[in-house]
Amino acid sequence: MSASHHTTIIILLLSNAIKAGTILLFPTIGEIFAERVGILNLGVEGMMLIGAFFGFIVTRLTNNPYLGFIAGVLAGGIASLIHAFISITLRGNQIVSGLALTIFGAGFTTFYGQRWINMNLSASFENLKLPVLSNIPVVGSILFNQDIIVYFSYILAFVMWFILYKTMIGINLRAVGENAKAANAMGINVYRVRYIWTFFGGLMAGAGGAYLTIGYAPFWLDGITAGRGWIAIALVIFAMWDPLKAVVGAYLFGSINALQFQLQATGTTIPSAILNMLPYLVTFIAIVLTSIIVKAKHIRPPKELGIPYSREEK
Amino acid sequence: MKKFASLILVVFIVMFGIGYTSQAKNSKIKVAFLYVGPHNDGGWSQAHDEGRIYLQKHLPYVETAYSESVPEGAPCEKIIRDYIHKGYKVIFGTSFGFMDSMYNVAKDYPNVIFEHCSGYKTRKNMGTYFGRMYQADYLSGLVAGMMTKTNYIGFVAPFPIPEVIREIDSFTIGAREVNPKVEVHVIWTNSWFNPVKERSAAETFIANKADIIASGCDSPASIEGAKKAHIFAIGYDRDNYAKFPNTLLTSRIWHWGVFYTKTLKEIHNGTWKATQYWGGLKDGIVGLGKFGNKVPKKVRNYVLKREKEIIDGKLKIFEGPIYDNKGKLMVKKAQELSDKDKLSLQWFVKGVVGNIPNK
């Protein structure tokens, strides 16, 4: 086979890898912000399922993928308010509440999703070649011949990074996650900040789920997220709570996912069960490696992650 | 209080009476079906459900019910026992994983008839049934072999088990009979029904210049991928022609209704015996779906000719010489692979690019 043929294969595979990575990028960024304000939300998988489900149904009914996407985003956000209420207002155990949300999301979507199984969508996001940028050899065809949601995720990652590190909003929200009492003393409304960013985490999980069913599958299936919510939570650590590093993690996972199929298609002798495991295995290894780096560089999770806050308690 | 209690008693008696009379009036044979997936999964379970509806429509003395997404193991056993307590006399289990549950319950109820799809355990009151899908696979391979221009065909496959390997092998034999340059590439999804994985596998083949995607998985996701890339697909389980008239070349289809009516007629006449049924094109339990709009007359005629030869017993698909994909002679000239060897097939024929794990 010629070299140009190999380049075409690589371009097509990596451009699919970006799409697969986008499904993870949204929830990872969302969870980064929830954790930055001290709220650990293990309900990402459940919120993604809810977003995927409503995104699918609304697209199916309206034939408008953008409307569907917005519906999925909002559904994820609404689901996150359950967790916000329990962990912020009621000061309940965040781990239990998050897990409950995941179980709820799976149960809810399985139950109401029965009659939608195997239905497909006729409307999906179309690729949009960006002028000039898409002419860059190789990289241009991989990054800039994508659909609008992917472009939105590029911008989002950058904007969120900017907000987190370069604005007053970012300083305030980080303060809430580091030391809520001090933040309160500074005049920040801790409850409100925590609610806003937990809700944002839900919106983003919904976005990831909706992109999965509308832009990627486009099908409905029980448990269609297949553990991607958990991968997103792992990627938060991999990204060291930084939205731009989340981009790297998400695309890495997407590429490994594409690679396992490519290896099989070329007739590799590695058993397919091992190949199917590859993305999870790589995530695991990546987490171990970053944990070591995190320790060496004294980077740590937000100090009050998972700790309820009460204004009355001294 | 006394009044209330007597009222309840009256209600109970009346209800019991109604229940009793309705049961006495009902002389239909009650038949229950167990599905591994949703009844509308677009594939395997739906094909069985269409068989159930066919049965219901053709035999007036039959009454049917089904349970969908039945888990394997203990819950399955409970569902079967519940049906029997409700008076069901025939149980069809449509997934391999129901085998042991059915086998256990069948021992306790010698008067209930059990039929298990794709398994191998039998009792006096428990038979097995399956179809020679490889015959339809071969025919669809002929179509693919004649239609491909890149000579790269992708096969999205669920599990590396004999049933699926047999499909890929016979498909490849068909494709290479008419086009020796064809390579059939295999990706395992390790799942019967996972549209996302099936779609990803199809996308990978498309990136590698495949112009036809075949699937042994139970969702139409790979057909969807082929449609988007403007290439062809070969369907499985049931005919999705109406949905993809320009993408599908043809489909390999189960007609379970044929077997279900045959079995119920035998039960009704009192001639039923537990057997290991393995019907083929001749019996009508498997077959090809409609040809796609893009399949030329010449191709259709050739395939129909070969189909007739199989039905007449003139053409044997697994007849030697057959080499495996490492070049070893597996079936000698003028010999045919026995049914036993077909049922335990664990190697790929020449022309398949793929790997069978644990071999």
Image (cartoon, rainbow, N blue to C red):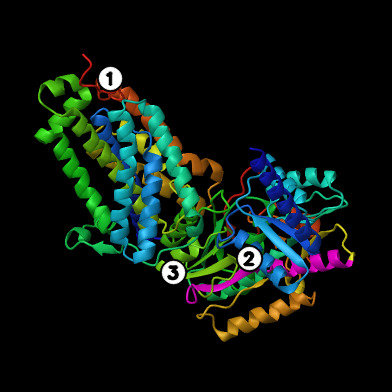
Residue carrying label 1: A296
Q: Residues within 10 Å of mark 2 (few under 14, many from 20)?
A: many
Residue carrying label 2: B171
Q: Provide residue B332's location: percent of width, then percent of height.
A: 78, 61
Q: Is residue B104 left or right of residue B231?
A: right
Front-most of residues B342 and B293: B293
Dot 1 falls on a residue whose secondary structure is helix
- Which residue is at a point 28% across and 45% down the rendered structure image? A203
Q: Provide residue B238's location: percent of width, then percent of height.
A: 60, 67
Disc 3 and disc 2: Cα gap in Å?
21 Å
- Does residue B261 show up? yes
Front-most of residues A1 and B198: B198
Q: Is residue B27 magenta?
A: no
Q: Provide residue B116's location: percent of width, then percent of height.
A: 75, 54
Dot 3 falls on a residue whose secondary structure is helix
- Which residue is at a point 23% across and 54% down the rendered structure image? A151
Residue carrying label 3: B227
- Which residue is at a point 10% across and 23% down the rendered structure image? A186
